[in-house]
Image (cartoon, rainbow, N blue to C red):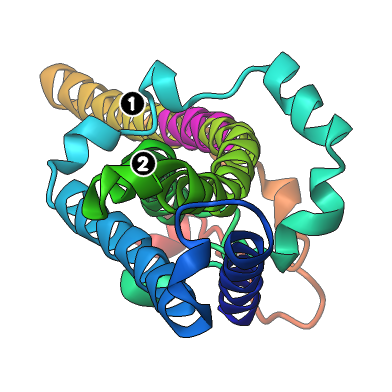
Amino acid sequence: MTLYLSVIFVCVALLTAGNLLLPSPMASLGLWPVLGLSVLAAVAAIAVDGLFAFLIRRLPAKWFAHDKKIFCASAREKKFYEKLKIRKWKDKIPELGQFTDFHKNHIADPKNNAYLERYMLEAAYGEVIHFVGLFVGFLVIFFFPLRYWYCLGLPVAIANILLNLPSVFILRYNFYKLKILYAANERKALRAAKKEEEQGREAASAVSEKTETGANAVSGQAEAGQTAEETGVPESAGAEIAPREAFPDYGSEDRQNPEPEVVPKEERR
């Protein structure tokens, strides 16, 4: 803001000095009238810019969507701004984000597309406001007697152009970078969504396989049980009886498991 005020002060001083030193219809008025008219013309230009800015801000946001071609700068246009060394002086131009509660002097959250959409919306509004300001400054000519148009109204309108044009360049240059960031974030989000979808399908497939395996096992057990019931033979019926040799203690010397004695037939009588 200080830079803007300084430029306005210098313009008013030059306008006053030019009208007093050069032949003009205002030269005969004297210092204070010329100075007063110069200040009044500058204030009138600022008021006209402010009025049109207020009206433009009331227009529907959909007219300023970031996908409108009118707001998208081309690569050739970007190179033109770089030839003007825009990177060296763009940060010195005042940014009037305090009037909209959204500052555009730096990109605070470049990975957030919601933030970038708001940034581009504000940039589009600002671009239109400053672009319209290039022309509405000429309305100052009609605020004063027409004999003063070339020595008062025209110089103020030209100064108004010099104040608005750099902002148009900066906003369009930044818009080009914002679109690149926005597209990159969209690609990353799309890749993340595809990866998450694939992981979800793999997880669902694994669960399905486990469920199918468990169902097959239960079905096999049920079939085996049904077969045993139909035949009347227990599952252990086919098991072999271990031979005697499998029990080495049977009939051993310690007589823990003595063999049964065979009594002769005559003794049993």
Query: Which amino acid type is marked by label 2?
Result: Phe
Q: Is residue 54 left or right of residue 136?
A: left
Q: Is residue 150 left or right of residue 145?
A: right
Residue bearing mark 1: 212
Residue at image x 66%, y 41%? 243
**Between 119 and 51, which is closer to the camera in this rendering?**
51
Query: Which amino acid type is marked by label 1?
Result: Glu
Spot occupied by residue 81 in the image (x, y as percentages of width and height)? 76, 33
Spot occupied by residue 96 in the image (x, y as percentages of width and height)? 46, 69
Q: Is residue 20 left or right of residue 140?
A: right
Closest to the camera, between mark 2 and mark 1, is 2
Spot occupied by residue 104 in the image (x, y as percentages of width and height)? 53, 62
State the SS at label 1. helix
Position above or below: 177 against 212: below
Q: CA distance from mark 2 to mark 1?
A: 80 Å
What predominant SS class does the magenta segment belong to? helix
Q: Quadrant of residue 131?
A: top left
Residue at image x 71%, y 80%? 255
Task: Name the mark on residue 56.
Answer: none
Asked whether 201 falls inside the magenta stretch, the response is yes
Q: Quadrant of the C terminus?
A: bottom left
**Between 30 and 175, which is closer to the camera in this rendering?**
30
Residue bearing mark 2: 138
Say few, some or many: other residues with alpha carbon within 10 Å of mark 2 (under 14 / 14 to 19 / 20 or more).
many
Region of the chain picked out in magenta, as a range: 187-202
Spot occupied by residue 2 in the image (x, y as percentages of width and height)? 61, 82
Q: Quadrant of residue 226?
A: top left
- Asked whether residue 97 appears in the rendered view, the answer is yes
Asked whether 20 falls inside the magenta stretch, the response is no
Q: Earlier in the sequence, mark 2 or mark 1?
A: 2
The number of discs equals: 2
